[in-house]
Image: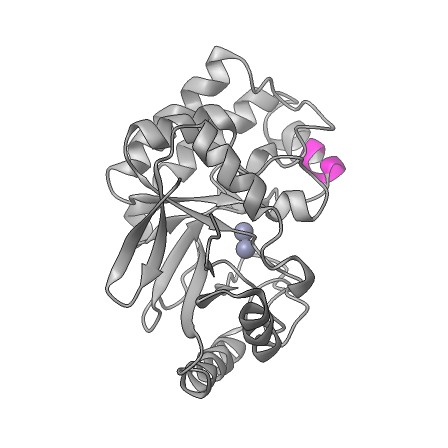
Amino acid sequence: MFYPQNLHTHGVLCDGKNEYEDTVRKALETGLTSIGFSGHSYTSYSNQAYCMSVEKTARYKREIARLKEKYKAQIEVYCGLEFDMYSDDDMQGYDYLIGTVHYLKIGNEFVGFDRDAQAVQEVIDNYFDGDGMRYAKEYYRQLASLPSYGNFDIVGHFDLITKHSESVAFFNENSQEYKKYALDCVHALAEKINVFEVNTGAVARGYRTSPYPSTFILQEIAKMNCGVVLSSDCHDNRFLTYGFEQAVEVCKACGVRELQVFTKEGFKGLALD
Ligand SMILES: [Zn+2]
Ligand SMILES: [Zn+2]
């Protein structure tokens, strides 16, 4: 099946490479029937290179509104936001919100971990006495509280902490202990946010050979009848639908029976045949 949408894309006003209009054109070329943008919400606690400032956020909203109007006869354009859980950015005025965690709150500090492997090791050494499993436990404990921070439509890259798992074992992903932390979090989130993304971003960037989340998590998401969307977390148009065919196969193998597509009327199921 051809999945006709990508709701998780970044452009030049945050950390993406492309102008938003170029991404709309690329989506048209690719045959998508809709395209959603999800700029990074403003995070005062980060180095701010990757997110949109308040001023850039206003420009972002104007630009996506312009494209929505300009291309309305050809493709549906949505204005979303990838909201970092502790961000105090305004959540109003978007078609949808993707809730994600890139920073752990430890004491009064916000500790970024969506970094290279060496930086993650430093986080584990400095804040978790070198114990990677404690890091994993704390990530899922904090992620589980996502619904209390806003009305999110989609949980983004659920197991982001496994970004480097194929090259460095910070914790044992196959252990019962790890699986329990992850699945307890799925259960906590699923009560409030009913759609999870299968995200191929780390595959496109060469960190992983399979999309987020790991198969045991996706199996549980399927078993609980939660919605699933595909996204490429696109920062570069060349990879707009990268890995979607593989992701469809992974979904089928994990028991997902339909994929969700966002519309003006909300999510609609598309059967996986
Ligand atoms: Zn993200
Ligand atoms: Zn993203």
Placement of 101 over or under 8, stated as above or below:
above
Ligand 2 sits in quadrant:
bottom right
Magenta stretch: helix, strand or loop mostly: helix
Q: Residue at x 28, y 54 (%)?
A: 268
Residue 106: tell me if it is visible. Answer: no
Q: Residue at x 38, y 34 (%)?
A: 256
104 left or right of 242? left
96 left or right of 57? left
129 left or right of 75? right
Q: Nearer the viewer, residue 234 or 51?
A: 234
Q: Position of residue 154 (x, y in %)?
A: 37, 50
Quarter location, residue 141: top left
Q: How many marks?
A: 0
Residue 95: tell me if it is visible. Answer: yes
Q: Residue at x 56, y 44 (%)?
A: 245
Q: Position of residue 126 (x, y in %)?
A: 66, 32
Q: Residue at x 45, y 35 (%)?
A: 251
Q: Nearer the viewer, residue 80 or 239?
A: 239
In the rendered image, residue 123 lying in the magenta stretch gets the answer no
What range of the chain is rendered magenta? 117-121
